Amino acid sequence: MIAAPRNRLERLANKFDERFGIEARGIQRVPEYLRAGKPTTRDYVQMWSIWFSANCTATQFTAGILGPVAFGLGFTDAMLLCTFGTIFGSMCSAYISTFGAISGNRTMVVARFTMGYWPSKLAALFNIVINVGYGLIDCIVSGQILSAVSGGSMSPVVGIIITALITWFVSTFGIKLFHPYQGHAWIPQVAVLFILIGCASPRFDTITPSQGTGATVAGDRLSYFFLTASVPLGWASQSADFYVYFPKSCNKYLVFLMTTMGLVLGKVMVEFLGIGLATGLAINASWAAAFDVSLGALLVEAFSPLRTFGHFCCVVLAVGICANMIPSTYSTGLSFQLLDSQAERIPRIFWCTFTVIIYVVCAIAGYRHLLTIFNNLLAIIGYWIAIYMVITVQEHIIFRRKRGWKWDQWDNKQYLPVGIAAFTAFCIGWVGVVLAMDQTYFTGPIAKLVGENGADMGLPCGAFLTAVIFPPFRYAEIKCLKR
């Protein structure tokens, strides 16, 4: 419930909450008395299931496929890089998630304490753009699969709309439906994925090595490592959002562990299969022909030995993508509220609805260009969140170790940092990103130094410059402004 509704929309949201259980609360802090008690084993399992369900979906096939297809990597190379990249990115997101139960504040509200009141609005804007992009990709994958199952008689647009409607309902309803849905959504997905392993794995190419030699293949490996790290890293801008109703006394190490395990296990299971399917394109002409049509067509072809049951498995995968869309859609509604004080007065349920409309329109317009969209979007995710992560870690470890946090001051501009240091470090960090990024639309001078294809080192270079710049600027900010 919204404690003190200020307008007709907020009063309407409270009525929905009271009568139907639709969550009205937006970015307002959840006080301790509403989440009193001790955490249970079920709470920690629930934390794991949120992330396992969100990431054990067909969307992750794309990240796996990019290893062999976009970077020319062999089966073993791609799997190893995917494993360690996923672990790295997952640990970053898990670290941010620990702030949820401790503070009772959403992720981008916590950013007000680390980046400052005004720069945190920039972080919220980035989160909106990235989540809309992810919603676009998820809709496209689901639409392509359902279209392929129908033999092309049904447009991908129909699948896009079906997936979006399910996502809209759960994300708009809020946390009371969110946790039960995410707690069980992974079960049919895992069953179907094991069927795919038995059906398609004999046709994987596990022998052919990575293409290229020396610095060229090293650059491709580096690029793919950071790309796979960017996938789970993308959750860092929202991972605390779903823990604000858990007891404050939750063990932060267990929160970190369960979040990491959910992210890693969910992602690698699907991405490994994506890698296997991609390696099989060169030796299975029917797979290659299907992939030329869409990712959905490739999955249908991989399940083809099972005939009608294989089509049913594809439908399960398509609908299961909703579990990946729901958390990001829920979080986007919160980020919209952080953009402006007037935006905060519009309840989360209306912003979630607006978000779904945006990415459905974009998905319908761009469903023919999935891999290009995915590859470029993931890099942007990693770039900005790496910078945000460095600022958060340094603020936490260096500057808040003794001063502590006053979480109930989440909306007090006089207490929160001004954000001069964070904004300066953020901008300079992006200079490092531009110098070292390697994308289809731009390759920086540092990236060009590695092999024939270059190497995308935007993430580590941006993080390094941020880590160097932020501490002295933040120290000066505290000394001069006292906050």
Image: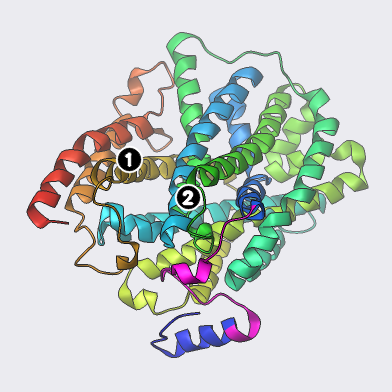
The location of residue 441, given as percent across then percent down, is 39, 38
**For residue 461, side relative to residue 25 (left or right):** left
* Residue to which mark 2 is pinned: 97
Instruction: Name the quadrant containing residue 473.
Output: top left
Instruction: Name the quadrant containing residue 268.
Output: top right
Instruction: Name the quadrant containing residue 106.
Output: bottom left
Q: Which numbered disc covers residue 390?
A: 1
The location of residue 79, given as percent across then percent down, is 62, 24
Residue 31 among magenta residues: yes
Characterize the magenta stretch by its predominant secondary structure: loop
* Residue type of the residue flagged with mark 1: Val
Q: Which numbered disc covers residue 45?
A: none
Magenta-tinted stretch? 18-40
Residue 441 among magenta residues: no
Dot 2 lies on which element?
A: helix
Residue 81 shows in the view: yes
The location of residue 308, given as percent across then percent down, is 92, 48
Q: Residue at x 78, y 27 (%)?
A: 285
Q: Residue at x 63, y 55 (%)?
A: 40
